[in-house]
Image: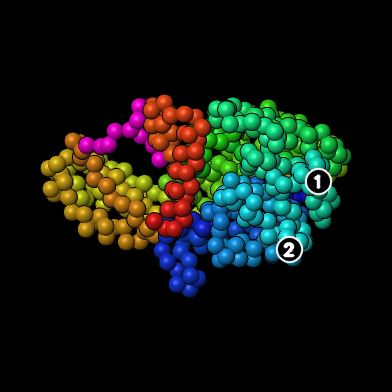
């Protein structure tokens, strides 16, 4: 049984893009669609039996009709080929208000063949029995954990009005762990099982390599310890949410697939693609993946992000900067240039020559000249420059101002939604 695991598609990312008149959307959106096309082509040509999507199909929580159409076109190809496809809701797939349909619900409403939608409402309808995908190679159990919705996880009579945000998170995290455990205990050990989660893990590796998704959830997202994945029950654990492709150290193969394309410079130099692994249904649990079937990253064409950093020494810095740009091979890449120079060097610097060297770049995010006496706006205490994401800065500021936890959580949520709305609008 051959399985694909991917996540964090984020259709709708438009930043650093060019208009494509023939499509009506930007080149960056096309980058993400090209990546999904590569996955579908692989699935069709390599005899894939199941595709597990671990959440975040779109950039916006309420995607445009065009974004939904283009995603549905690719899912339809998998469906028509008889490939069992599992769609899990991530935080970007959930609506902005309670009671609205989420972005993936249409597939269940239309009863699309070979497509299973897993969300927070599943448990109210089906109890804690995990979905079973009927693949061409036999059944596959897929217990899951969607991005948590507090109102659906906590009991109706839970009084959260006097709780701190940390106390609310503690309760939510307990419920998340229980959801995994109850599904795990109900599994048939004779049938292969893959746990799919869209979740932030409380693990040092994840914190070090969280990628671009981190700023959207800093200070407000429940997290799980690795032990709460109850990994001994599963053959593979498919994770989504963080954009870096990385393996967690557990006895069961446990991977964040990562995003299908780099979203910004925070994902520079990262390999992008989807995970592929083979399961032997005849083997015992814990021994179904091995040998040539080990999980591996199948790379897809990815737009390069390139940062050119140079500190020229000559009185005329222009030739050195041009050589640095040339060495970076910026053709078709999204590029930014950082140049550290003196006041005297600035007077001799010929910016148009550097700009001409960047003509073959896909997008130039800026040429920044940093002078020794350049004044910068101070950051709140405790925030390092390389971690200065806007939501994190606000979070630190509110803590320094001793803002009430509940109010701080609400302000951070509004800030995240505002930033997301601005980015989605292409601002």
> Which mark is drawn over residue 49?
none
Part of the protein shown in magenta: 375-390
Looking at the image, which residue is at 28% across and 50% down? 367
The answer to which of 335 and 331 lies nearer the viewer is 335
Residue name at image x 63 percent, y 54 percent: 100
* Residue 398 in the image, given as x and y percentages of width and height: 41, 31
- According to the picture, the residue beneath numbered tag 2 turns out to be 110
Left or right of 360, for residue 97: right
Query: Is residue 79 inside the magenta stretch?
Result: no
The residue indicated by pointer 1 is 126
Q: How is the image coloured?
A: rainbow
Dot 1 or dot 2: first in sequence order is: 2
Q: Secondary structure at mark 1?
A: helix
10 Å crowding of disc 2: few (<14), some (14-19), many (20+): few
- Is 195 situated above or below 134? above
Q: Which SS type dominates the magenta stretch?
A: loop
Is residue 363 at all visible to an observer of this figure?
A: yes
């Amino acid at each position: 049984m051959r399985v694909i695991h991917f996540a964090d598609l984020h259709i709708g990312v438009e930043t650093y893009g060019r208009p494509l008149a023939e499509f009506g959307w930007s080149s960056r959106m096309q980058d993400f669609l090209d990546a999904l096309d590569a996955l579908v082509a692989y699935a069709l040509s390599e005899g894939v039996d199941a595709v597990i999507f671990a959440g975040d199909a779109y950039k916006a929580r309420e995607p445009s009709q065009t974004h939904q159409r283009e995603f549905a076109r690719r899912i339809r190809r998998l469906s028509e080929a008889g490939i069992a496809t599992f769609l899990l809701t991530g935080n970007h797939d959930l609506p902005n208000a309670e009671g609205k349909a989420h972005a993936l619900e249409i597939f269940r409403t239309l009863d699309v063949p070979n497509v299973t939608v897993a969300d927070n409402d599943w448990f109210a309808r089906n109890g804690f029995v995990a979905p079973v995908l009927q693949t061409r190679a036999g059944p596959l159990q897929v217990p899951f954990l969607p991005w948590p919705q507090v109102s659906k996880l906590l009991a109706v009579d839970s009084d959260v009005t006097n709780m701190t945000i940390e106390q609310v998170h503690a309760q939510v995290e307990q419920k998340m762990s229980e959801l995994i455990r109850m599904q795990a205990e109900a599994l048939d050990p004779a049938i292969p099982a893959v746990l799919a989660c869209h979740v932030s893990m409380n693990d040092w590796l994840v914190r070090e390599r969280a990628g671009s998704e981190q700023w959207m959830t800093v200070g407000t997202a429940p997290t799980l310890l690795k032990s709460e994945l109850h990994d001994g029950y599963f053959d593979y654990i498919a994770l989504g949410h963080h954009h870096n492709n990385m393996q967690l150290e557990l006895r069961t193969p446990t991977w964040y697939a990562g995003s299908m394309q780099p979203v910004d410079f925070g994902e520079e130099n990262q390999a992008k693609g989807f995970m592929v692994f083979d399961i032997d249904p005849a083997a015992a649990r814990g021994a179904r993946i091995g040998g040539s079937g080990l999980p591996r990253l199948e790379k897809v064409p990815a737009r390069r992000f390139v940062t050119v950093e140079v500190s020229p020494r000559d009185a005329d810095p222009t030739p050195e900067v041009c050589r640095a740009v040339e060495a970076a091979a910026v053709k078709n890449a999204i590029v930014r240039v950082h140049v550290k120079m003196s006041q005297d060097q600035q007077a001799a610097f010929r910016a148009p020559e550097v700009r001409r060297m960047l003509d073959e770049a896909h997008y130039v995010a800026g040429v920044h000249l940093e002078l020794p006496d350049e004044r910068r706006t101070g950051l709140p205490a405790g925030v390092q420059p390389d971690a200065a994401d806007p939501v994190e800065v606000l979070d630190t500021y509110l803590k320094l101002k001793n803002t009430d936890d509940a109010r701080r959580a609400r302000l951070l949520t509004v800030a995240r939604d505002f930033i997301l709305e601005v980015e989605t609008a292409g601002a």
